[in-house]
Amino acid sequence: NLSRLSVSLETLESELEARGEERRGAREALLRLLLPHNRLVSLPRALGSGFPHLQLLDVSGNALTALGPELLALRGLRTLLAKNNRLGGPGALPKGLAQSPLCCSLQVLNLSGNCFQEVPTSLLELRALQTLSLGGNQLQSIPAEIENLRSLECLYLGGNFIKEIPPELGNLPSLNYLVLCDNKIQSVPPQLSQLHSLRSLSLHNNLLTYLPREILNLIHLEELSLRGNPLVVRFVRDLTYDPPTLLELAARTIKIRNISYTPYDLPGNLLRYLSLASNCPNPKCGVSLISLRLSSISVNNYGSIHYLCLRFSKKKIESTLIAASDKLNLWTSVGNTASL
């Protein structure tokens, strides 16, 4: 662990060479090397020669603009953490990466917090990748070739400028976690329903106005994050609770419980409110209609009578269909703030 030393590249080179010499001939090879939060502008040359068996390399929080050819010498590397650097320009990744042994060994790659404007083509050839993190970059799109990463289990692309999800993303059979939050995505392709292993889908803080019906086919989905999208904002706004007044609650209680009273027992406004009450004509309904306009429509020649009790309010419509006799009576009660 050589993290947070804040030393120059030359000093770190000397330290790594000395450590490499110490490890030569040792029974146990060095498997993890932590170099985050130093002042690295390039990978130390001693990496390839001194640590051939390295499995984890962390160079996060430096000033790297490129991962040089030294990386290709780490033939057994499984995890590469290079987040929060300055990677993203031409030559940010070494040439020949897709043809190197890393194509078969690298399983976890974290390049979040860099400057990539597009997913590097060579990354799409790392067939052993199980986790790919490119969050907090400047990505404009997801290439269709993402479907080449058939072993991918976790894909993190949050905090970019992505506008569309390619249908090919649905061709990743092992994908468990998909993070596309904090982008500019306006729609979700129905092909995502093919991600039968998906357990978590993060789409919050985008521009979604609807979800495809096929999303219901994700039978293993345990987490779906949608906050901060127009469809959720509108949904919550429409469901804003409009509670009844105390006057309405008092009148309902008296009518439903058949509480007897005299003009001297109740306030005048409650008496006037109760005088407007009506009961649903359906003997099996028993609903008291307080301060509501009541109307009925009779439809003959139906062979049997049904009462269709409809209670309209601002927020919802409840309906109950109860068989009663041999005509169809439609009774509608419309709240004083709504219209029929």
Image: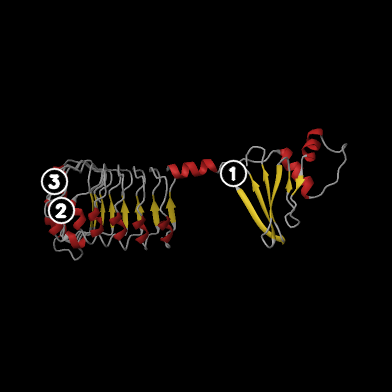
CA gap, disc 3 to disc 2? 13 Å
| In this picture, residue 29 sits left or right of residue 246 | left
Q: Which mark is residue 71?
A: 2
Q: Which mark is residue 235?
A: none
Residue drawn at x 28%, y 56% is 168
| Foreground disc of the pair 3, 2 | 3
| Foreground disc of the pair 1, 2 | 1
Q: Nearer the viewer, residue 278 or 304?
A: 304
Q: Name the residue under label 3.
A: 91
Mark sitting earlier along the chain (3/2): 2
Give the amino acid type for the residue marked by disc 3 in the picture. Gly
Give the amino acid type for the residue marked by disc 2 in the picture. Leu
Mark sitting earlier along the chain (3/1): 3
Placement of 240 over or under 171, stated as above or below: above
CA gap, disc 1 to disc 2? 61 Å
Q: Which of 326 and 272 is in front in this view?
A: 326
Numbered circles on residues, count: 3
| In this picture, residue 24 sits left or right of residue 304 | left
Give the amino acid type for the residue marked by disc 1 in the picture. Lys
